[in-house]
Amino acid sequence: MIIAIALVCFAVGFLAAIVIAGNPTRSRKDVVGLSDWLQVVRSDVSSNINSNCWKQQLSTRVIPVANEEDAGLLSKEQVETSYSKDSWQGLAYQDFKTAIMARESGLKTFPCIYATMGYRADEHRYVFLKSDNPAEPQNIRLIAPALRAYLSMSQSLGPNTSLVIVCAPSEKEKTVEEYNNSFWDMLRGLRISDPQPWPKDVPESVESEKWTFCYNGEPVFPVMLTPAHMQRWSRHMSVPIIALQPKWVLDRLLSTPEKREAATGKVRKLLKEYDQIDISPDLTSYGQPGTSEARQLCLLDENESASCPYSNFDR
Ligand SMILES: *[C@@H]1O[C@H](CO)[C@@H](O)[C@H](O)[C@H]1NC(C)=O
Ligand SMILES: *[C@@H]1O[C@H](CO)[C@@H](O)[C@H](O)[C@H]1NC(C)=O
Ligand SMILES: *[C@@H]1O[C@H](CO)[C@@H](O)[C@H](O)[C@H]1NC(C)=O
């Protein structure tokens, strides 16, 4: 039985590796295909052998890493050496890398060029969750210490740093709305587990144009990317991913009107080319009256404005 399980794991992983390796010029469409594939991989595995293959894979193939002080934070090199290429973590990481590097011909430049710079300079830190729903308590218990550790060291990582929170592949297809709910519930869970009071200088009302999510007393900018975004490719990944920057990263990037103009101009131009849909009406400048940063975090896959299920994270 054990051998059978191992064989299935191997075959599944091997096939997935072929899917990726055999597609040097894949477009975002293929990436959409990859998330379907990951889904199949998962449901196949669970229905065929009725045992948690992924867990086994984790325990047998993943070398435990003594890393950023046991908070589960991995550098790209640690991700590459800790997870085999055919594990879901390895596949998800590879897909993320391919999307933001977009080196191969046939791929369009990823619009968030600062994410690409951050990746190249090894300023990202990664944390992998146990399921596709970041709001589950088992995942909050991973994210909270990782985020605390990350924020305390983020200044030392570089000007384009991000924390990349990678969820496991979904077992069945989910909608943007379902991912949206789990994203907001995750923020709520983080807020509940946050030992620090909400900072005095940040409004609590989510609708305020000066609102921004805070953790451990520090403003952060978490963005949700999902397998369900089919038009807004800039928000698409084969597994759900939350990319989070400390707000100081954005503040530096946009510190003068000239810098702001240059940075937003570049990103918006690339967004137009990359996405199959108009730039979201929610992508507004922070602090502009009548807008709220909350609307930018999980964008709709439609040409419409989103809102946030919470009006105040402390109530
Ligand atoms: C990182 O971000 C800063 C702006 O905050 C930018 O000026 C710089 O060129 C970026 N890239 C690298 C590779 O540091
Ligand atoms: C998207 O919405 C804006 C207004 O909110 C509108 O001006 C624009 O034409 C819309 N784009 C498409 C492709 O429907
Ligand atoms: C997320 O949920 C809120 C509240 O239910 C809703 O207003 C918003 O449009 C949703 N966003 C997305 C991207 O589905």
Image: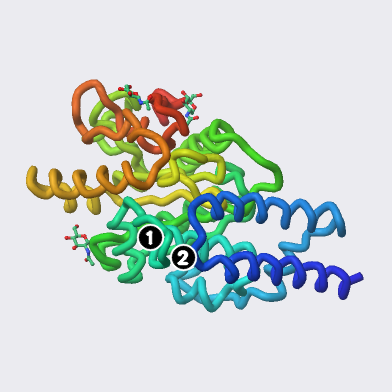
Asked whether residue 141 is in view, the answer is no
Total labels drawn: 2
Asked whether residue 18 is in view, the answer is yes
Hey, what amino acid is under mark 2? Leu
Q: In this image, 308 relative to 176: left or right?
A: left
Counting from the top left corner in percent of width and height, residue 89 is at: 59, 64
Identified at 35% across, 33% down, the residue is 278
Along the viewing direction, whichever of 198 and 38 lies nearer the viewer: 38
Counting from the top left corner in percent of width and height, residue 125 is at: 41, 64
CB within 8 Å, label 2 to label 1: yes
- Disc 1 CB within 8 Å of nearest ligand 1 atom: no
Find residue 73 and name its label.
2
Counting from the top left corner in percent of width and height, residue 53 is at: 77, 63
Using the rendered view, name the quadrant where residue 182 is placed: top right
- Disc 2 CB within 8 Å of nearest ligand 1 atom: no
* Quarter of the picture holding the N terminus: bottom right
Q: Residues within 10 Å of mark 2 (few under 14, many from 20)?
A: many
Mark 1 — residue? 150
The earlier-in-sequence mark between 2 and 1 is 2
Identified at 46% across, 49% down, the residue is 242
Along the viewing direction, whichever of 144 and 294 lies nearer the viewer: 294
Find residue 119 and name its label.
none
Hey, what amino acid is under mark 1? Tyr
Identified at 23% across, 61% down, the residue is 159
* Quarter of the picture holding the C terminus: top left
Q: Secondary structure at mark 1?
A: helix
Identified at 55% across, 60% down, the residue is 92
